[in-house]
Image (cartoon, rainbow, N blue to C red):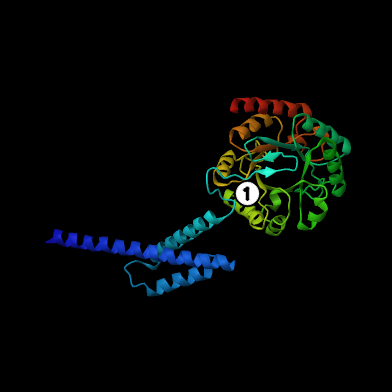
Amino acid sequence: MSRERIQDLRAQVDEINMQLLDLLNQRARVVSEIGKLTQQLGTSFYDAQREAEMLTALEMANKGPFSNETIKALFREVFRASMALEEQQAKAKIRVQRSSPDQRTVIRMPDGTELGNGKFQVISGPCAVETFEQMDETAAALASRGVKFMRGMAYKPRTSPYDFQGLGEPGLQIARQVANKYGLYVVSEIMDASQIPMMSDYVDVLWVGARNMQNSFLLKALGRVNKPIILKRGLAATLEEFMYAAEYIVSSGNPNVMLIERGIRTFEKATRNTLDIGGVAVLKLESHLPVIVDISHSAGRRDIAIPLARVARASGADGLMVEVHPNPPVAMSDAKQQLYIDQFHALMDSIEDMEKTFA
């Protein structure tokens, strides 16, 4: 008789399990509908006050035998699962998410140069514009190796307010003059949306620095600009946050966005930052946007530039960014990470050797 009773109770448990499963899925469908409506309204799906009210109501209705702490723990997991479902659905809808394996964004420049089409491109130049002579010597080296994208940084956000902050518009004028001489494109960092009209006269590709990755006002403004945008990953940003930052630009109307991995802050001190090469692979898998690897700011040192460049090429990235200067020891910023011109040529030789392997 006891065994029969156990079997009967177990059958009741099985039935209740099925009822719970049906109710959980029913709840998920309702929550999903709420998420769609909140998205249309432009409001946040997560409501902390609402969650607290639901938990309080459950505590007051609880008759046992589970304690209130157990009930709260169980329902917090239900709430968390609902949030995860909503995030997954929202992620699937974002424009920067890859919808098919062959989907890719290709950035096309006026002369036909493309970035994101499978050819490995290089963006290079000094950390900052200092003089015409410095930029001219560097540009000549870049052009001799077929590099089309030149750094022309005139605004330098620095940790210390007393460090070199860039030449401003005069620096952009130098960069434009040199770029025109050698048939290069100017890549330069924009600090604020108010700079867009002025910088548009000098710059071909606008660069959003790590400090501004989550500056939504700037990102949305750049979504209304008819120029390619390079978006740099924040020093402590997750890949999800990085992709959502790109979504601000793309959803605002500008599809020509490149992602640049520049290393993340960890406990390691041997390099300036830690190059997240696994993150590059994930970005290439999940997004159709071109991905560039910054081997200068991630390392903070020139002596490991070549192996990092080779790793970047092997990772499937669309290109790399490396800093080069005619005389790095006297550079006004980031002297330790900028390559000498002969080192730049050695790096390009190494990449070309790899290209033969991939051909």
> In terms of image quadrants, where is residue 338?
top right
Q: Residue at x 54, y 56 (%)?
A: 93
| Percent position of residue 284, x then y | 57, 42
In the image, taking residue 48 as reference, residue 335 lies left or right, namely right
Instruction: Say whether residue 125 is visible.
Output: yes
Find disc 1 in the rendering and name its residue: 236
Element under disc 1? loop
Q: Residue at the location (65% across, 24% down)?
A: 353
- Looking at the picture, how far across and down is residue 95, in whole percent? 59, 53
- Tell me: 295 left or right of 165: left
Q: Is residue 358 above or below residue 158?
A: above
Which residue is pictured at 43% across the width and 64% down the height?
29
- Lateral position of residue 93 relative to residue 16, left or right: right
Locate the C terminus and report the quarter of the image it occupies: top right
Position of residue 6 measured from the top left corner of the image (x, y, whole percent): 18, 60
Badge 1 amino acid: Ala
Q: Nearer the viewer, residue 56 or 322?
A: 322
The vertical placement of 141 against 159, above or below, is above
Question: Can you say whether 330 is above or below 158 in the image?
Answer: above
The reply to whether residue 195 is visible in this rendering is no
Other-residue count near label 1 (Cα within 10 Å), few / some / many at <14 / 14–19 / ≥20: few
Please tell me which residue is depicted at 82% across the width and 35% down the height of the picture.
182
